[in-house]
Amino acid sequence: MASPAKSFVEVGSGNHFPLENLPYGVFRPSEGGDPRPGVAIGDLVLDLSVIAAAGLFNGPLLSSSTCFSQASLNAFMALGRPAWKEARATLQKLLSVDEPTLRDNAPLRAKAFFPMSEVKMEVPAVIGDYTDFFSSKEHATNTGTIFRGPENALPANWLQIPIAYHGRASSVVISGTDIHRPRGQTTPPTGEKTPGFKPSGLLDFELEMAIFIGPGNELGSPVTVENAADHIFGFVLMNDWSARDIQKWEGVPLGPFLGKNFGTTISPWIVTLEALEPFICEAPVQDPAPLPYLTETKRTSYDIPLQVAIQPEGETKASVVCRSNFKYLYWTVSQQLAHHTINGCNLRSGDLLASGTISGPEPGSLGSFLEQSWAGTKFISLEHGGTRKFIQDGDDVIMSASCQGEGFTVGFGECRGKVLPCKPY
Amino acid sequence: MASPAKSFVEVGSGNHFPLENLPYGVFRPSEGGDPRPGVAIGDLVLDLSVIAAAGLFNGPLLSSSTCFSQASLNAFMALGRPAWKEARATLQKLLSVDEPTLRDNAPLRAKAFFPMSEVKMEVPAVIGDYTDFFSSKEHATNTGTIFRGPENALPANWLQIPIAYHGRASSVVISGTDIHRPRGQTTPPTGEKTPGFKPSGLLDFELEMAIFIGPGNELGSPVTVENAADHIFGFVLMNDWSARDIQKWEGVPLGPFLGKNFGTTISPWIVTLEALEPFICEAPVQDPAPLPYLTETKRTSYDIPLQVAIQPEGETKASVVCRSNFKYLYWTVSQQLAHHTINGCNLRSGDLLASGTISGPEPGSLGSFLEQSWAGTKFISLEHGGTRKFIQDGDDVIMSASCQGEGFTVGFGECRGKVLPCKPY
């Protein structure tokens, strides 16, 4: 894939947001104002409401659309891939070094660009429903082994179903939001009947990625696995914070609830499938073959290297604790989407579908402390000092991802959140 | 509690919507137009957008509010109990036989009233998140016995935790919406490894009630059990349609997903706590005593008789298959709400919290066919002919509820849905 021309906006080597990326987000200027859609370019944010108001989205699908004058990306997401391609072509042209329209219009540039360090990012869509899958075979095997032993590691249905549950939409927060340690009930101590009740002692991260849904589907009408990609707007990083002690005591028979719904952090910039095209790779071979409704004629995934680092309170350096990759996932996003709708369940624009913890087969690729400490039975050494079994108060958990292209980087920025002590109650 | 004056709107004996009730909903006139809030009175719907535009909400909290000129009740729900009480007082006065303002203004009456049979009801709120509890001890014991045997009937945590899971908000539909039988994977036949894949053969109803949340809470800040009622706007009936075969195969380890999220039906009229005050009763004694954060100084519930009937395709009569009561629930709505937020999880106005299937101790009070047919091992006789183990295509499932006061009825109307065959795929 040929690179587009360079941008007149300076983009340093290794910067996550060159002209090849152009991820979408929603931001407020630091001086205040309503949330509005933006695109990241280098160290700047381009205000799409300004570009739209200036009449520069002049293609047939967007010239009369109000999708960029809204406080969320839902309307733009709903337009579908032809409109997304038109927006990308318009923006790549507008931002290119050879195009004078914006480059040479100083008053418009002054209105349209904001330093990224001076804006406040927001959750980019009104999330109607948030679904969390469980699509890493390594993660499912590890947690199954921990909780049920090696002989029953994978649940009986796991190789047939992209297992998922509904999570909480209200507590999805944007990167940089502090997370208060949750309190709750825990399993009664041995020999006792009364549960514990305390701040979670086993707070964990889960390294995930998530897609935002573009056009939805009608209730009763499934999306086929072959058409699924047309319903996917793009990807973000996600930290599915998990309180293992609360989760364990509450989880049978109806699954995760308070162990998860106190907070879920996402990265602010949605990287589109168009930007990820250079990083398409083969998806893992599936054995047994899935049922026909989950069978893809061509199984592809994305080669997206992922990283998790922990920066304890007062430390200046973050210690990397995990290096994984999106490509390890056994179930693809198209399979997830086809499964989610096979019973007629309707998805809506702005819905969030997460991957589940992305653990891999390599050493160092375990996507949670639960797995790394093997349920707290061993210490994890931090490279810049200290050890952990689970997350401590004051720890900043920093996820990041970037794909290295030929002469450019397509990155996701960071998904970070600091754990604060449990609030008084 | 003294009854208010009678209304100038005729309300027949046994009608669910006298002046004592005044439930809120959202409707469209049959001739078209935007959805708007309304109140049921007798066989009529009063258009609250018209009443507000006429300046008749003239109390201090509502006179300058735009909450009744919106397409959902979320804004009104967010205002909280003082505003709800003001609205109720205004409406009871406006509709009373002694008050000329509306009674004697024929042009305003012509604009403000619609025959209930000629409006289309809508889901009354934008539901940010929908949570389903599991709060009937009888239902939990029955399903536990069916799936795990009598010695492990109640899960170990059940007497300590108001167990719940997150359901799907997108597929909550209003009474009268047809439900297509879902298809999906089912447990592999004995001796085989490949799952079944077919229209559900074990489609069921679940008799539930649900609350809409009024004012929400901030992320990180729990609602106490004593303050919980201030966050509850009112109640509706709910049918939590369930495909037992899909549910069984997918459910371990993360709980219900496609077995539930193909459709959830609610009744259109939200009955407020004020209307239910005459029907407050004691809640069941809890043994063991719950943890302090779930301990109520006074345990109350509501005496709301519930009924489920089945009307097969082509039949003129519906056969009652269940008579239960909201008061049977072991965990109260205040306990549900306190538990839901104890980890800091935030609720938002318009969120929906359902009770779980309401089964009782009496014969005939089982709130699902799963329990009535004991997992399909015996037939249920319909009083007007025919038998069932689960729901057949063409069956109309009709839930209703009404509370008998002294000289008046506070009812919920109906929550109904007809099952259509699985759509071609």
Image: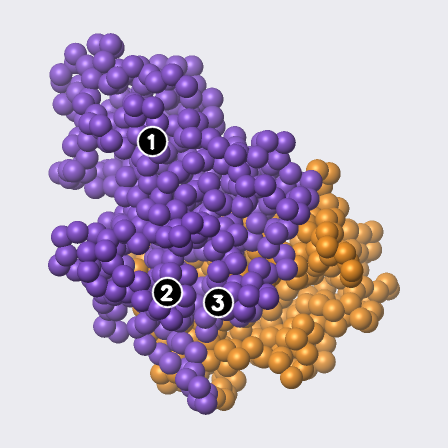
Chain colours: A purple, B orange
Residue A290: image quadrant is: top right
Q: Which chain does tag 3 point to?
A: A
Tell which circle, 2 or 3, labels the residue nearer the N-terminal end.
3
Rendered image: mark on residue A146 = 3
Q: Nearer the viewer, residue B13 or A161?
A: A161
Image quadrant containing the N terminus of chain B:
bottom left
Question: What is the three-letter code of the residue carrying label 2?
Answer: Ser
Q: Residue at x 59, y 66 (%)?
A: A151
SS at mark 1? strand
Residue, disc 2 = A373
Residue, disc 1 = A404
Q: Are marks 2 and 3 in contact (CB under 8 Å)?
A: no
Q: Which chain does tag 1 point to?
A: A
Question: What is the three-letter code of the residue carrying label 3?
Answer: Ile
Report the number of numbered marks. 3
Crowding at dot 3, Cα within 10 Å, few <14 / some 14-19 / many 20+, comes out as some
The residues bearing labels 2 and 3 have C-alpha atoms spaced at a distance of 11 Å
Q: Position of residue A389 (x, y in %)?
A: 32, 66
